[in-house]
Amino acid sequence: MLPRKALFALLPAILVVSGIRTSAQAHVTEGQTTYLYVDAKSGSDSHSGAQSSPLKTIQAAVNKADANNERNVGTKIIVNAGVYREAVSITAYRSTGATVTIQAAVTGTAIIAGSDVLSGWTLQSSGIYTHVWTPNLGTCAVPSGWPSTIPTIARRTEMLFVNGKLVTQVMSTSQLRPGTFFASEGSNMIYLDPPAGTTVSSASIEAAVRRQTLNIASRSNIVLRGMVFRHAANCVNTAGVTINGASNILFDSDQLMWNNWGGLGIYGTNSVTVQNSVANYNGGVGFMGANDQNVLLSYNQSDYNNWRGAQGNLYDWGMGGTKFMYMRNTTVQNHFSYHNQAQGLWFDTDNKNITINNATLVGNVMAGVQLEADEGPITLENSHVCSSGAGVNILNVQGLTIKNNTFYNNSGTGIYDPAEIFVAGFAGGHKITDWLTGQVYNLITTNTVVTGNTFENAGSGQNVFGTYLAGNDWTQFATTLNAGSNKWYDPTTSSNFKIVNGKAVTLGGWQSATGTDYSSSWAKPSTSPAGACAIPTTSYPDFAVYFSRESYSMSSGAATASLHVNSYNCGTVSLWFTGLPSGVSASLSPNALTSGPVTVKFSATAGAATQTVPVTLWAVSGSRVHTITFNLHVTPS
């Protein structure tokens, strides 16, 4: 699935024309006259690589291209349709910098997969199928700074695909039900309870076994075009495709899908363009990067990511549609992020000279846009941010300009305090060190510009502005704010600005509290922004479930949790719990629905033991299964 606007835009500013890049962050000269051909079906790595004598693997073609590169000869590798089950590596190898292009003969038909086919399954008497399993991928380490209590399921990397569809991993044979599998490293066996209607003997069953599909390190002038990268068994906070310490890298019309955590990761790299590409259905994050300079993302899409993180009730660490850290001179334009079970677009810590232009960010569980611990300047402009946990979440950011955007119906997920624009952060500032200069900043949200925007709530309980800033943090924000020509509206109340100390005020009260925004108005827009926030219909019927917090603690034997179900062309979802200890019960209201909120009440008897236990929510619709495991802190009544 290519981005919906990529097919009808010529994009003269970023396309390769006659072999020369006209203007972009990556300036890669193509036009190579030396070609190599790869064909998974008819090729052999003993072949020459000519069109009539193709190689079998992409790595063999890369090795030949590297030999050409030593002679300063650029190479274009044409990859015929097929699945290439390998991990491709493009490393320094005495490179002269001559351009290497890896290009699908037909866009979207050349697939580098981290999975292998498993055939010859054995049917057990219980209806469960088994297969020998020896990769022993293990449990991933908890990333530095992340919670040590991350449930084990979120740190596993096994994936099983039956006829192209992911089945859900469980942690024991006792949890198996149709649409699930269990990988037992102790017995070197994998157990599959296939989706209803599956004929296992003729089904295509693929298991993820390789951590990566592509690694580019210490190279320059590399182009990837029209390729598909999928099924990498990558660990938490890592990517299936990585670029490390490189320069002049172009990703064009590529797909990064169904990897266990990240799709594409770019690190310590200068001059990168990612365009017309898709990073969807990855277990953690679609696009990710850190310590990069001169980066352009244009006409890309990152949707439905963080299904693996959601299994461990994780939404706010290193996941979402697109997440970057420590970036310099980065532009994200014409970008789409839909229905990620985390943030849609996130710039987290020490980001400078960032522009977000014409982004459409809709239905993300956390914020549509999150900006955190950034010294700026950052500009968010001409974008639509809709139906997410918050519109834009601003945490200790300096030099932020928000102009000519539309914010609509945000704060309906129950994750954040409800607001179209929410300002928060560490009290007294957030100290960071510039990774390039060593300069230390104590970041307090100041010098914010908000102009020409439309802010519209869609129902009760939402705010157009919210904050929990107080004291000097609020004073510095309010006295340095420059706002004007905005349109604000809520259909239920005009006292919709929640300012210092939780006080709800009208537009007039907001103007008095900040000393600015006098040219703005309070009125319902003449044209509803809902149309521009519409999400394309997905071809993959599914649903998502998420809690409003990562863990829950009882008080006097009781706790209440908020749960949401979002259906994407899927039917009724039934809900229940397993793993509740003796003396503890849970009620769900309702316990079956298609989409909407659910109230969960946990109760403990006087005889229940004080303990912290992992409990698992099951959400099932037909053979589609999702689980969420989280920690419940039990105290008796």
Image (cartoon, helix red, strand yellow):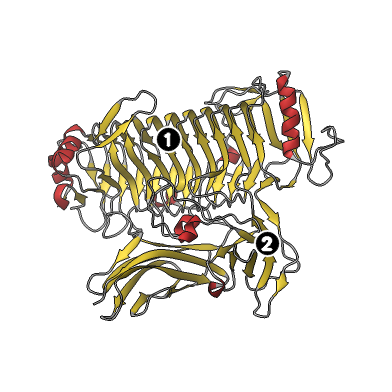
Looking at the figure, which quarter contains the C terminus?
A: bottom left
Residue at (67% x, 71% y) in the render: 129
Describe residue 150's horizontal placement relative to residue 539 as left or right.
Answer: left
Three-letter code for the amino acid on which mark 2 is drawn: Asn
Residue 475, percent across and down? Answer: 15, 37
Badge 1 crowding class, 10 Å Cα cut-off, few under 14, some 14 to 19, many 20 or more, is many
Pointer 2 or 1: first along the chain: 2
Question: Is any atom of residue 631 visible in this view?
Answer: yes
Q: Position of residue 315 (x, y in %)?
A: 40, 54
Alpha-carbon span between mark 2 and mark 1: 38 Å
Helix, strand or loop at label 1? It is: strand
**Amino acid under disc 1:** Asn
Q: Which mark is residue 357?
A: 1
The residue shown at (41%, 75%) is 591
Horizontal side, residue 117 vs residue 531: left or right:
right
Q: Secondary structure at mark 2?
A: loop
**Residue designated by label 2:** 163
Q: Nearer the viewer, residue 255 or 59?
A: 59
Q: Is residue 276 visible?
A: no
